[in-house]
Image (cartoon, rainbow, N blue to C red):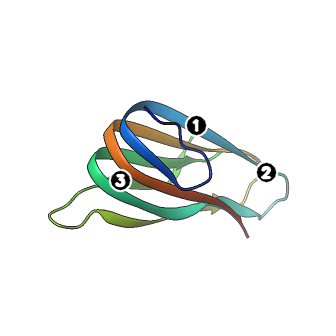
Amino acid sequence: FGYVTLTPTWLLNAQGQNRYVLQVYDEGQRAGYRGRCVVQSGRAVLRLLAPDGRQLAGRTCQKVGDRGEWTLHLVGGGQPGQYQLVVDFDAYSGLLDLSETRQ
């Protein structure tokens, strides 16, 4: 269970997909999400999609050896429209801390 918000959120065995939408109005503006994930188990895959559906950035949060904490910086832009952050969970337990960023 658990639903990611744009605040630090602990999730336990999260499954499924969450989507967040960013609206960019100005040509050349960059927007996205930054933060961190601290993985106890499972996996979360984060993808930032452009208005045309192309993937601009991505990160997989999963334990690799003893390392379970990752910095997230998923930013893109240049064209006006709706950008989406897609988060796919596979039995993910841990912290997901996201903040919207615009440049």
101 relative position to 65: left or right: right
Q: Which numbered marker is on residue 19? A: 1
68 relative position to 66: left or right: right
63 relative position to 22: left or right: left
Which residue, given by chain and number where applicable, does mark 2 sit on?
Answer: 80
39 relative to 1, above or below: below
First in sequence, mark 2 or 3: give its number.
3
Q: Amino acid at mark 3?
A: Thr
Q: Is residue 83 visible?
A: yes
Q: Position of residue 2 (x, y in %)?
A: 47, 36
Q: Position of residue 83 (x, y in %)?
A: 67, 46
Which residue, given by chain and number where applicable, does mark 3 sit on?
Answer: 60
Q: Amino acid at mark 1?
A: Arg
Q: Which numbered marker is on residue 57? A: none
Residues at marks 1 and 3, CA–CA distance in whole angstroms: 16 Å
**Disc 2 vs disc 3: which is toward the camera?**
3
